[in-house]
């Protein structure tokens, strides 16, 4: 008689969850932590204070978690003001480390909720900065109000994924301006292009050899209609055209594939 196959699953505790056993997304609040230390108090901004006091109905003595600038603390609410809640830092926690490779994602404004979706997922993947630019063949139109909203999307994404730093989301009037904002030198700015290109993304990254993790990278992707010739000409000498393979990826797919490939080749995955 054959015995049933029994599989044993070993569960390893995540060291970056220590002290957060009771933590949920709604328990994490962003604050400007300038040289923070246990015992200090911090004041949340109006939006975070409203959520803590009005939405969560927290009262003095309740626990929360405060993060910002790559640091995180467990904290106790001392003053439950909906416009400026005051918390005392109790214990410093170990946040997840940033990726071993620093990258900026330059993406266009996309239609529907696709820009929000990309900002959220790029935050989860560890982007250091996100630049959203206007393009000639864009379907959706960007604005400063839109960029402000995207920064809020980034903050909420970091709360969910456990990051203790929040990447800034910048707006740019063109892809040329976006590459300038990326501040990456030639060979480190890569344009994901669906046209006739022989250099693959992985090939361009491997050229860096052992310097992959020490270089700043800017990954640039186009809108639903692609880049026009004038935009591509404006980037010659400032960025390198690369391909993601023979299949054409959607505008909301290419940035995530590119970021994942970079992180994989850098050894993060």
Image: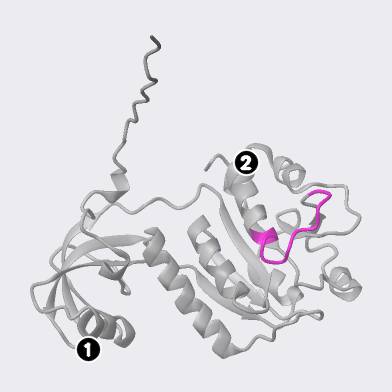
Q: Secondary structure at mark 1?
A: loop
Measured as percent of width and height from the top left, residue 51 is found at: 28, 81
Q: Which residues are magenta?
A: 245-255
Q: Is residue 252 magenta?
A: yes
**Residue 132 bears which disc, if any?**
none
Disc 1 to disc 2, C-alpha distance:
46 Å
Question: What label sits on residue 82 in the rendered view?
Answer: 1
For disc 2, the marked residue is 265
- Name the spot of residue 256 as percent of width and height, x first: 62, 57
102 vs 142, left or right, is left
Q: 168 above or below 219?
A: below
Residue under the image location 50 percent in, 83 percent down? 149
| Label 2: which secondary element | helix
* In the depicted structure, whether residue 166 falls above or below residue 217: below
Query: Quarter-wise, where is residue 91 in the image?
Result: bottom left
70 or 109: nearer the viewer:
109
Please identify the quarter of the rendering in which residue 184 is found: bottom right
Residue 103 placement: quadrant = bottom right
Give the residue at x 70% y 83%.
140
């Amino acid at each position: 008689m054959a015995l049933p196959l029994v599989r044993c699953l070993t569960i390893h505790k995540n060291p970056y969850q220590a002290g957060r056993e009771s933590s949920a997304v709604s328990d994490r609040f962003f604050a400007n932590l300038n040289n923070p230390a246990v015992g200090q108090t911090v004041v949340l901004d109006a939006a975070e204070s409203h959520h803590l006091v009005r939405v969560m109905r927290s009262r003095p003595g309740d626990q929360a978690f405060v993060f910002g600038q790559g640091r995180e603390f467990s904290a106790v609410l001392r003053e439950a003001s909906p416009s400026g809640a005051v918390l005392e830092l109790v214990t410093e926690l170990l946040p997840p480390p940033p990726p071993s490779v620093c990258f900026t994602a330059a993406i266009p404004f996309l239609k529907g909720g696709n820009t929000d979706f990309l900002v959220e997922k790029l935050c989860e993947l560890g982007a250091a900065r996100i630049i959203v630019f206007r393009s000639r063949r864009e379907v959706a139109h960007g604005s400063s109000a839109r960029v402000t909203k995207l920064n809020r999307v980034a903050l909420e994404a970091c709360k969910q994924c456990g990051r203790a730093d929040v990447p800034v989301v910048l707006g740019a009037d063109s892809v040329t301006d976006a590459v300038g904002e990326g501040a990456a030198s030639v060979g480190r700015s890569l344009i994901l292009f669906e046209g006739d290109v022989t250099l693959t993304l992985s090939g361009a990254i491997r050229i860096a050899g052992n310097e992959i993790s020490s270089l700043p990278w800017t990954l640039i992707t186009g809108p639903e209609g692609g880049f026009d010739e004038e935009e591509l000409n404006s980037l010659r000498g400032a960025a390198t055209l690369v391909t993601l393979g023979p299949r054409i990826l959607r505008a909301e797919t290419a940035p995530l594939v590119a970021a994942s490939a970079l992180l994989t080749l850098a050894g993060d995955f």
